Image: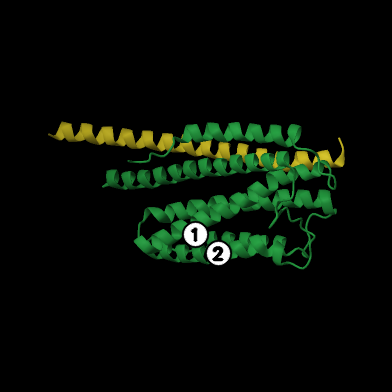
Chain colours: A yellow, B green
């Protein structure tokens, strides 16, 4: 591999790594949001059940 | 007649198709540069990334202006997300530019090129935006101060962009002149395709990040409402 090829591979590689890291961060965030939404849904269901029990 | 925004998945698929086309054009169609040889191929990724960074900073400033004019709360998050994207693409510009500089000039960085230094100033200016933003309590005051700061930064964009034409040293290459692009048709096609792909990718990332941040805000409000 020539020096020119190495530099071109490095420049395009940096961009590719950036896109992959971004995708990984978004995937992590999505799973956190899914978990938190689930917790809130459970909380809302428990509250609704409690209100119906009181009524 | 109402204009609906294209769905994010369609835009993402289009960005991937354009990226594939740009790689094809760059490495198999566009000829090698007579002066720089293969290392000139970095141009097709470095310059579109830099232009996208300018566009993201411009978008952040535009949203900041809308916030100051209309007091619309949603523009704060939009401005912040635009500047966040601009900073990421700005960092990428500096990294890919350094690699190209090492390949072409034999150094990773040179302080004698005005455009390089001015881009670094622009990048650091917007890095300081985050320090300012997160040093203030969330609320209308933070929104307004952040918006004013974002607007000040936009003045640096044309200075940075045109610095190369005003500079007395010509170490940094000038490709686009008054006579048009100084490259062959296939090189220009590769450049335009790459630019379109990276700009579209940045827009997809902007909307995805914005959706995530808005969901975060909604969840926080929902949690507070349920805790009462």
Quarter-of-image position of residue B163: bottom right
Q: Residues within 10 Å of mark 2 (few under 14, many from 20)?
A: some
Q: Position of residue B48 (x, y in %)?
A: 64, 47
Q: Position of residue B98 (x, y in %)?
A: 75, 52
Q: Secondary structure at mark 1?
A: helix
Residue at screen point 48% across, 32% down: B9
Q: Are marks 1 and 2 in contact (CB under 8 Å)?
A: yes
Instruction: Say which chain tag 2 marks.
Output: B
Along the viewing direction, whichever of B158 and A51 lies nearer the viewer:
B158
Q: Quadrant of the N terminus of chain B?
A: top left
Q: Which mark is residue B61?
A: 1
Residue at screen point 84% across, 43% down: B37
In the depicted structure, whether residue A35 falls above or below residue B71: above
In the depicted structure, whether residue B55 falls above or below residue B19: below
- Number of numbered tags placed on the structure image: 2
Along the viewing direction, whichever of B134 and B42 lies nearer the viewer:
B42
Q: Position of residue B29 (x, y in %)?
A: 74, 33
Quick check: B93 left or right of A51? right
In the depicted structure, whether residue B95 falls above or below residue A51: below
To which residue does mark 2 refer? B153
- Residues marked 1 and 2, same chain: yes
Q: Considering only order in the chain, which callout, 2 or 1, is on the residue closer to the N terminus?
A: 1
The reply to whether residue B40 is visible in this rendering is: yes
Residue at screen point 61% across, 39% down: A19
Along the viewing direction, whichever of B47 and B134 lies nearer the viewer:
B47
Quick check: B40 left or right of B8? right
């Amino acid at each position: 591999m020539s020096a020119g090829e190495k530099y071109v591979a490095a420049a395009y590689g940096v961009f590719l790594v950036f896109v992959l890291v971004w995708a990984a961060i978004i995937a992590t965030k999505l799973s956190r949001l899914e978990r938190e939404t689930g917790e809130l849904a459970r909380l809302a269901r428990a509250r609704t059940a409690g209100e119906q029990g009181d009524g | 007649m109402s204009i609906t925004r294209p769905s994010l998945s369609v835009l993402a698929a289009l960005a991937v198709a354009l990226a594939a086309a740009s790689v094809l054009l760059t490495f198999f169609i566009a000829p090698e540069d007579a002066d720089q040889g293969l290392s000139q191929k970095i141009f097709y990724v470095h310059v579109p990334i830099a232009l996208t960074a300018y566009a993201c900073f411009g978008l952040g400033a535009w949203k900041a202006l809308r916030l100051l004019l209309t007091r619309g709360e949603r523009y704060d998050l939009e401005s912040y997300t635009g500047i966040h994207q601009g900073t990421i693409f700005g960092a990428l510009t500096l990294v890919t530019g350094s690699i190209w500089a090492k390949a072409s000039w034999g150094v990773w960085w040179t302080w004698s090129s005005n455009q390089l230094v001015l881009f670094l100033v622009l990048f650091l200016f917007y890095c300081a935006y985050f320090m300012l933003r997160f040093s203030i309590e969330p609320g209308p005051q933070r929104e307004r101060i952040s918006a004013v700061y974002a607007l000040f930064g936009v003045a640096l964009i044309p200075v940075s962009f045109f610095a190369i034409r005003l500079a007395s040293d010509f170490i940094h290459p000038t490709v686009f002149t008054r006579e048009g692009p100084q490259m062959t048709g296939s090189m220009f096609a590769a450049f335009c395709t790459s630019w379109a792909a990276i700009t579209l990718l940045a827009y997809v990332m902007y909307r995805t990040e914005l959706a995530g941040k808005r969901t975060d805000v909604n969840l926080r409000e929902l949690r507070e409402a349920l805790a009462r």
